[in-house]
Amino acid sequence: MCSTPQQPGLRSFIIYDDLPAGCIAFQVPDDSSAPHLHAGEFVVIDPADRDPAEGELFAITWKSNIQQDWQIVQMDLREGRYGRNGMMRNDTMWFVGAPAPQAMMSLAGRPVGPALRRCSGPYDDDYLRDIAHGRIIGLFQSPYPQLTEVVR
């Protein structure tokens, strides 16, 4: 019998000892994806799989001059009323954001209110395919302890 309570929303990943053919590894830069992913771990990315997928984690790079670093995001499909070219219509669009909720902090540095998942959007399929490096399909556990970075 399992003594650990089930934790809704947590993901499980395949652990790879070798990178699958055509895949790349990326070192998780920080804990913004915790509890799913942690700083220093290596994710395995399938660059052939760049189609947006509900609830899946992707490595992306935004198309702006401000933010050029790789980021890990979760994609969510939402129905709503969105405007395009001055016209409002009911549509289904993509939103992307940190995989895990984050607490708002007071000026004193204490969490305030419930944790929230901040997202940006709406985006269409083509834009997300264009900024995606690929879907995260697992974790890479190198048999070589001195390995510190594969792709950066």
Image (spheres, rainbow, N blue to C red):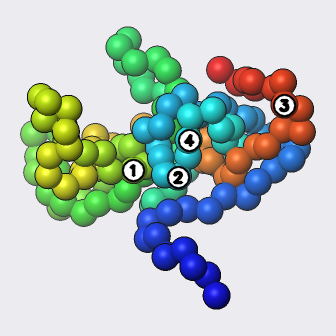
Q: Dot 2 corresponds to which residue?
A: 36
Image quarter (top left, top right, bottom left or bottom right) of the N terminus: bottom right
Q: Dot 3 corresponds to which residue?
A: 145
Q: Dot 4 corresponds to which residue?
A: 38
Q: Is residue 104 left or right of residue 49?
A: left
Do the numbered discs 2 and 1 sit on residues whose CB atoms are within 8 Å?
yes
Foreground pick, 7 / 117: 7
* Separation of residues labelled 4 and 3 (CA atoms): 17 Å
* Separation of residues labelled 2 and 3 (CA atoms): 22 Å
Residue 83, percent from left and from top? 14, 46
Residue 119, percent from left and from top? 29, 44
Do the numbered discs 4 and 1 sit on residues whose CB atoms are within 8 Å?
no
Which tag is nearer the camera, tag 2 or tag 3? 3
Instruction: Report how many numbered discs are placed on residues in the image.
Output: 4
Image point (63%, 32%), residue name:
40
The label number, if any, that marks residue 75 in the structure image:
none
| Residue 148 lies in quadrant | top right
Image point (41%, 22%), residue name:
63
Q: Secondary structure at mark 1?
A: loop
Q: Dot 1 corresponds to which residue?
A: 100
Q: Is residue 124 visible?
A: no
Which tag is nearer the camera, tag 4 or tag 1? 4
